[in-house]
Image: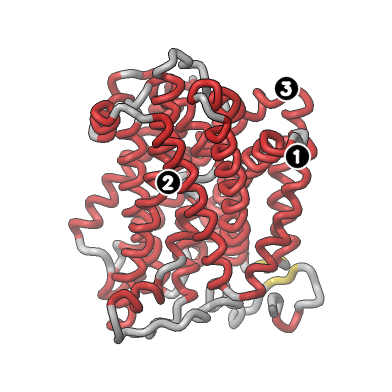
Amino acid sequence: MRWLGKKEAGDVHTATHEELRNSLPEVHSSVPVQRTGSLLRQFLAFAGPGCLISVGYMDPGNWATCIAGGSKFGYALLGVVFVSNLMAMLLQALSARLGIVSGRDLAQACREQYPPAVGYGLWVLCEIAIIACDLAEVIGTALAMKLLFGIPMVLGAVLTVLDALLVLLLMRRGFRWLEAFIFSLIVMIAGCFAVQLAMASPQLSELFNGFFDPTAPVRNPEMLYISIGILGATVMPHNLYLHSSIVQTRAFERNEAGRRHAIRWATLDSTLALGLALFVNAAILALSAAVFYKSGRTDVAEIQDAYQLLSPLLGTGLAATLFGVALLASGLNSTVTGTLAGQIVMEGFLHLRLKPWARRLLTRGLAVIPVVFVSALYGEHGTSRLLVFSQVVLSMQLPFAVIPLVQFVSSGKVMGTLAIPRWLSAVSWVVSGVIVLLNILLLREMW
């Protein structure tokens, strides 16, 4: 796989204009599509990017916040999970639209549309978000290895560096192989939680009541911190950069009719994939509510505690095993989004290209160091608090990705005749305002 073009012998270089014309040039327009034939075949040609971005919505960071919310408040925060996923569906659809219409990912668009100082500032914030996300992946994967195989947390965190090889091997086989791998693990995660939910037998009436009442955190300030964590774990800032890039792997016709066709199927792809992510997130919170909250264990806020208590409370060792397997699959799955998003952000904002192994090791190393440090000093409970905090950090970065995205897709200068209509622009700005407001409330509560 050619990565650095004429300068591939070096580890890093400033990319040429020709190299940076396309996002992820090594897989750009590599997946054929068709505008004729059955609707199913047309959809399947575009299906895949949605699975990749959905991974970020069910990574280990979601587990910590949903477990804590379910054990402490029962089903009350299901409404937050539901609304967060609706926001995610809207924002990811806008992200796909930006990539398809403009031919630029979000990072490239920011560099082109904003002054250099603003662009560099957004790059720094985005890198912080990627490191925070990677931090959650390291902790989750290391925890899964400890729970399933008894590997110490510090060693498990170091071993996660090796997952860089997995991404590179899959990318070498083609983008469809990468998508198939991700989809297989998503099905495994969903299957594990479906079985666990059946074992837990949650109260359906309370579950549905929780789903359709997203105002609980407004009435109860104690819920605000976890609610912001759920939002940060659900609407992922780096996913907005990722999605605007990987939709361009499809070889759709680069004219207005071809772009409209691509927008329609790409939106359906991401919406269905995020519906599956909604099921997983809601299942984690509902499982925690049905098992821990119902049993009076409102203090369960850590993944390892949930793993250890599931079997005794449900009366079967299979529950904990399924939980651990799903956690490991989630951690492995999440490595892909961090790798690709990191590449997209660095190339788009800085016009710098690192070899994939170098980029991955750099990002993963920055995430491993604090995990090893906290594990050595404070043990597993310290890493669990670090995990929840990482999701709050992600939420704090959201406005700096969401606001540029909405601005670009609303702009006729950037999108031409395919800019979003005014009513959708208004809804998108309201969503952006809600995200900013929630972060302001969180800062007030923390201070």
Quadrant housing residue 247: bottom left
Which sits earlier in the primary sequence, circle 3 or circle 1?
Answer: 1
Task: Please give the name of the residue rendered at 32% of the width and 54% of the height, measured from the top-left corner.
Answer: 90
The amino acid sitting under disc 1 is: Ile
Mark 3 lies on residue? 378
In the image, taking residue 206 as reference, residue 340 lies left or right, namely: right
Q: Is residue 67 above or below residue 178?
A: above
Mark 2 lies on residue? 235
Q: CA distance from mark 3 to mark 1?
A: 14 Å
Q: Is residue 2 above or below residue 157?
A: below
Q: CA distance from mark 2 to mark 1?
A: 25 Å
Mark 1 lies on residue? 369
Quadrant housing residue 306: top right
Query: What secondary structure is marked by label 2?
Result: loop
Which sits earlier in the primary sequence, circle 2 or circle 1?
Answer: 2
The image position of residue 209, as x and y in percent, is 24, 29
Please identify the residue farthest to the top as the structure is shown: 296
Please identify the residue farthest to the left as the structure is shown: 423
In the image, taking residue 230 as reference, residue 342 lies left or right, namely: right
The amino acid sitting under disc 3 is: Tyr
Task: Please give the name of the residue rendered at 51% of the width and 51% of the height, measured from the top-left corner.
Answer: 188
Task: In this rendered view, identify the residue nearer to me: 241 or 183.
Answer: 183
